[in-house]
Image (cartoon, grey):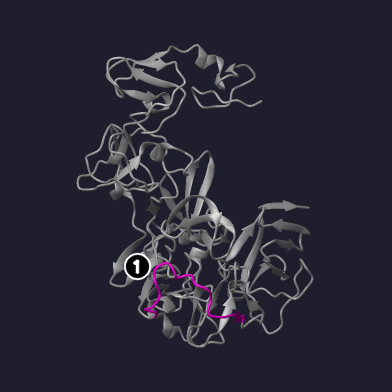
């Protein structure tokens, strides 16, 4: 039988004190501790353990908990033991300023910045210390680990503020329109005002690994290194709501890495942190660009971060999601990262990412659509222009796809991008000591895969560097002909 100590909320060992009548459990260490606490930072008087099993409202967190309540005999101060030692000043990832604990709030409407529910002003909460910034968070929302890692468990009272001026910019501006980016220090990069003039030549941004179709970009004056203009400005250090610590932008030219929110492997730039129990936290730049509130073209309401995994309303998979508090729409980070528009060889127009046959263009042009009907039944069924299979849009079927609003051309997401959306052709990567070149599979004759022994049907190929043999990435394995060893990219392990 596994029991939890009600004093320090941890699993008891083989020895413990237990009351079977009221299910009260203490480990031997907590049972011998004194029944009173002096902690002037929380309360000026001595606090005594309240021995009765009773639900009393804690003045610090505003919640009732029937075990380990301490009370003041001189006044009506009631507090949970776990709330006595909470810090006075903290920093959470959801807000750019530090927060200070306040025993009560001013008489106005306050909404929690984490759970977005109302804050009862009679009880304690954490509020922003910056003048003119009105931001508050429930005590438990700010300090609990159940809503994700948004607090690094540090007391910042008396600690100096971090100086943002010491953070280097992503590039040095040499002159107007000419920069030297930190990830490409050997060559200068020039601002290109119009990507369209490349006359159909497809180039991939080194940071987000998405093709450039229109708009401005930075291109190297001597090689094929290129950025979207926005990607060139990505900060080298970033505070993101999905992680408690500062994240550092890390170029990934030779390694295939997996984002911990969308679970997609890529060789693009990542925001990383090495402060997580010795393990590296990794967030690709597409997920890192998502902030609250998030506006997506497939939904009329702003989306907010969800504290748990849920089923995506587009792909139907159980993943980390963004949620709409108004209608319950859920969007996973993988679907949120798909490009809004893509180019298809057999269509002169750009294709738009759509959902259930309803696109942002339809929504904007239909004045008779009432609020909440954005995800009405699809207008009809579509057939994929590439594989010629039906794109099912009826009933409970979920399907995100790309569609031309003018020509009615439609593509499955998988048919549009293949298995390797975020693999950059022209890159050389190392997978468990083996070097591979990533090459577009665009030849007239498709080579034979060393893994499945069939003709390669994917858009990207992996070619072993030491032997000129075609290797195929099928999102499952890469077969090395030199060592006859399979590399499982999903498990990141190798087996003889």
The image quadrant where one finds the N terminus is: top right
- Residue toward you, 104 or 256: 104
How many residues crowd mark 1 within 10 Å: few (<14), some (14–19), many (20+)?
A: many
Q: What residue lies at 34% left-to-right and 42% top-to-bottom? A: 137
Q: Is residue 134 left or right of residue 140?
A: left
Reply above or below: 356 against 152: below
For label 1, the SS is: strand
Q: Check disc 1 and report the residue beneath it.
A: 179
How far across and down, in percent of the image, does residue 397 sit? 61, 68
Q: Is residue 479 left or right of residue 24?
A: right
> Dominant secondary structure of the magenta stretch?
loop
Q: Residue 85, can we see it? A: no
Reply above or below: 105 against 353: above
Reply above or below: 168 against 40: below
Number of residue marks: 1
Reply above or below: 372 against 249: below
Q: What residue lies at 57% left-to-right and 67% top-to-bottom? A: 423
Q: What residue lies at 33% left-to-right and 45% top-to-bottom? A: 118
- Residue toward you, 303 or 454: 303
How far across and down, in percent of the image, does residue 474 sit? 68, 66
- Residue toward you, 369 or 91: 369
Which stretch did the figure color magenta? 366-384
- Residue toward you, 219 or 367: 367
How far across and down, in percent of the image, does residue 322 sit? 47, 57
């Amino acid at each position: 039988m596994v029991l939890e100590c009600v004093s320090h909320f941890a699993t008891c060992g083989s020895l413990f004190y237990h009351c079977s009548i009221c299910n009260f459990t203490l480990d031997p260490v907590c049972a011998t501790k004194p029944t009173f606490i002096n902690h002037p930072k929380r309360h000026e008087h001595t606090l005594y353990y309240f021995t009765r099993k009773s639900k009393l409202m804690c003045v610090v967190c505003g919640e009732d908990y029937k075990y380990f309540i301490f009370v003041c005999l001189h006044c009506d101060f009631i507090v949970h033991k776990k709330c006595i030692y909470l810090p006075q000043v903290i920093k959470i990832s959801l807000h750019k300023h530090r927060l200070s604990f306040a025993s009560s709030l001013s008489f106005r409407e306050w909404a929690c910045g984490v759970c977005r529910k109302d804050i009862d002003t009679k009880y304690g909460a954490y509020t922003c210390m910056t003048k003119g910034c009105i931001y508050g968070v429930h005590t438990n929302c700010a300090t609990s680990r159940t809503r994700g890692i948004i607090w690094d468990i540090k007391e910042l009272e008396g600690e100096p503020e971090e100086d943002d001026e010491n953070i280097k910019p992503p590039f040095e501006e040499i002159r107007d329109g000419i920069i030297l980016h930190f990830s490409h220090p050997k060559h200068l990069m020039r601002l290109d005002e119009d990507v369209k003039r490349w006359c159909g030549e497809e180039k991939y941004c080194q940071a987000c690994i998405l093709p450039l179709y229109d708009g401005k970009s930075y291109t190297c004056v001597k090689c094929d290194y290129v950025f979207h203009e926005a990607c060139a400005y990505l900060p080298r250090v970033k505070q993101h709501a999905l992680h408690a610590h500062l994240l550092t932008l890390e170029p990934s030219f030779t390694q295939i890495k997996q984002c911990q929110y969308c679970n997609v492997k890529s060789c693009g730039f990542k925001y990383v942190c090495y402060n997580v129990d010795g393990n590296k936290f990794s967030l690709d730049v597409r997920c890192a660009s998502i902030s609250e509130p998030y506006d997506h073209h497939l939904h009329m309401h702003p989306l907010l971060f969800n504290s748990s995994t849920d089923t995506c309303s587009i792909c139907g998979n159980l993943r980390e999601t963004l949620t709409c508090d108004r209608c319950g729409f859920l969007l996973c980070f993988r679907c949120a990262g798909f490009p809004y528009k893509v180019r298809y060889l057999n269509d002169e127009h750009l294709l738009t990412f759509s959902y259930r046959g309803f696109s942002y263009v339809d929504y904007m042009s239909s004045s008779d659509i009432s609020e909440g009907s954005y995800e009405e039944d699809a207008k009809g069924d579509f057939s994929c222009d590439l594989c010629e299979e039906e794109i099912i849009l009826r009933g409970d079927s979920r399907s995100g796809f790309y569609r031309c609003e003018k020509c009615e051309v439609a593509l499955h997401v998988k048919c549009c991008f293949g298995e390797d959306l975020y693999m950059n052709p022209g890159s050389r990567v190392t997978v468990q000591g083996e070097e591979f070149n990533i090459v577009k599979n665009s030849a007239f004759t498709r080579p034979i895969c060393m893994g499945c022994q069939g003709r390669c049907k994917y858009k990207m190929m992996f070619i072993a560097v030491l032997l000129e043999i075609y290797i195929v990435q099928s999102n499952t394995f890469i077969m090395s002909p030199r060592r006859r060893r399979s590399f499982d990219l999903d498990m990141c392990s190798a087996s003889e």
